[in-house]
Image (tube, rainbow, N blue to C red):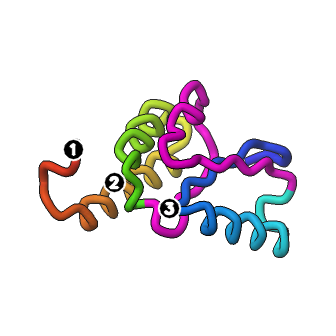
Amino acid sequence: MSKGSTFFVIPGTWDEYEKFKNDCYTNGRYFGSKFVYIPPGGVNILRGWENPDGVFIGTWWGRQDINDIILTLVAAIRKDDYPKKAEGIRAAIEFLRTKKQKPDDWFV
């Protein structure tokens, strides 16, 4: 990630986003990045980006729109060029599988 790049934050709540952002400003993590909050129902903010940088934080897995977010990220990431990002999405999908109660709750 380059300095001044856009960094998407996908939290479970606004408070989780604010805490993450403040912690990053305090410790210099992701210095110079523009943080973009992805609110519930805000998956369209991610559409059109290629290989977006970002993080899932807090209780992200409980969001009603998490399946749409994951599908959007899967489509946006060129896994051959950015294998670590592809691995991160795979890890998020596996984590979601452990959180879902019924198989029909999940799209995979």
Tell me residue 30's x, y (percent): 77, 59
Q: Secondary structure at mark 3?
A: loop
Residue indicated by mark 3: 12
Residue nearest the viewer, comparing 5 with 18: 18
Tell me residue 103's x, y (percent): 13, 54
Identify residue type, mark 1.
Val
Reply above or below: 60 against 83: below
Residue indicated by mark 1: 108
Residue at (64% x, 48% y) in the render: 8
Q: Is residue 45 left or right of residue 7?
A: left
Give the class, few, some or many, for how many residues have Cα within 10 Å of label 3's Cα (few <14, many ≥20): many
Residue 93 — which label? 2
Tell me residue 34's x, y (percent): 79, 47
Check whether the beta carbons of the residues at disc 3 and disc 2 lie within 8 A of each other. no
Residue at (55% x, 36% y) in the render: 81
Residue 37 — which label? none
Q: Is residue 37 left or right of residue 64?
A: right
Check whether the beta carbons of the residues at disc 2 and disc 1 lie within 8 A of each other. yes
Tell me residue 26's x, y (percent): 84, 74
Q: Secondary structure at mark 1?
A: loop
- Give the residues in magenta: 32-60
Identify residue type, mark 3.
Gly
Q: Quadrant of the C terminus?
A: top left
Q: Answer with mark 3 or mark 1, whichever residue precedes in sequence.
A: 3
Mark 3 or mark 1: which is in front?
3
Identify residue type, mark 2.
Ile
